[in-house]
Image (spheres, rainbow, N blue to C red):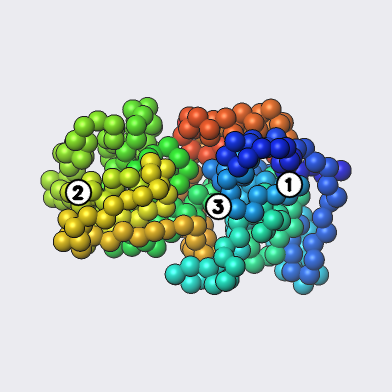
Amino acid sequence: MPKAISISKIDGKPGQVYYPLSLDEVPKPTPKAKELLIKIQAAALNHRDLFIRQHLYPGTTFGVPLLADGCGTVIATGSDASSSWKGKRVIVNPGTGWKDSPEGPEDKSGYKILGGTKTNPNGTLQEYMVIDESEVEEAPEHLSSVEAAALPLTGLTAWRAVVSKCGEHNLKPGKNILITGIGGGVALMALEFARAAGANVYVSSGSEEKLQKAIKLGAKGGINYKEEAWEKKLLALLPEDNKQLDAIVDGAGGDVVEKGAKLLKAGGIIAVYGMTVGPKMPFLMQAVLKNIEVKGSTMGSRKEFKDMVDFIKSKKAKPAVSRVVQGFDLDAINGLFEDMKKATQFGKLVIDISQEAGSSSKL
């Protein structure tokens, strides 16, 4: 029978428990009228998957396949789905309930992400999955299945933060963008999108190794945020014809507004998609006087997912893949979760279900 991986229930309090992975045998699904049957080739982890194992994510449940990121080949179509999908390699939109509104999900119950929860009981860490034909895009031809599986959730999150929130006017040649916390999947996709659009991209990290890797991927320069007065060092790196930042894409929170007010142009934008440093972020009068905008950003709409995939196809952009393991090997997959716990990864952590030869680019 086909295999899937979910979590098993054990006793423990949220934040203290760590649910074990469960290798399940499941029936091969049959696509309904508008659905596609996809043979999954690769699936990728996100931080929410670690939170699910720690029972720190809303709707955590058992027996539902994990993971929201996946790439596979359509092997059958439902009676009312287009037969043209058959044989195509596709990537899966990681959530539902958000069509095209720029403000947020139209569904009053909110955006429902795939993998490991009762709100959307489907996931990509399984041999076969069925999903509505409206929720897939054809995978970019220049990407391997492993690389394509690394795109959906982090790519969508980065796209909304960089393009929808910072604005295309800040992504042109000569514009300066700072991306904080380089090394995680969203930050690296933000780097790739801003770089491919033509902007000068600068990055921050507490790791010199990650800074050097980001420069190899196209960043103009990097600064270690652990160093005193790092903002002055960043200003020294900026080109002479534009000694200020146009936008900041931030996943840390903390003092980003305080630092950003010194670095950003008048009317500059801070797009915040996470707060790993601290859940509170003071908004200072200095930022008010400079007309700086702080914009929260999370996930993205179905339209933004398509726009993101189209951009990747046109620019031949690529996600960074940190490490790949093969097949439904629970020990190996647990090792990917350990990478995430320790924050040692630089890019996405991917499971090559198909064991496609030569499919990974490790950084």
Residue 63 or 142: which is nearer the viewer? 63
Q: Which residue is mark 3?
A: 152
- For marks 2 and 3, the one nearer the N-term is 3
Q: Position of residue 308 (x, y in %)?
A: 48, 58
Secondary element type, mark 1: loop
- For marks 1 and 2, the one nearer the N-term is 1
Q: Position of residue 145 (x, y in %)?
A: 62, 44
Amino acid carrying label 2: it is Leu
**C-alpha gap between disc 1 and disc 2:** 46 Å
Residue 89 seen in the figure: no
- For marks 3 and 1, the one nearer the N-term is 1
The answer to whether 69 appears left or right of 200 in the picture is right
Residue 289 or 322: which is nearer the viewer? 289
Say if 17 sits above or below 241 in the image: above
The residue shown at (73%, 47%) is 62
Say if 221 sits above or below 68 in the image: above
The answer to whether 159 appears left or right of 40 in the picture is left
Q: Which residue is mark 2?
A: 263
Amino acid carrying label 1: it is Phe
Q: Which residue is mark 1?
A: 62
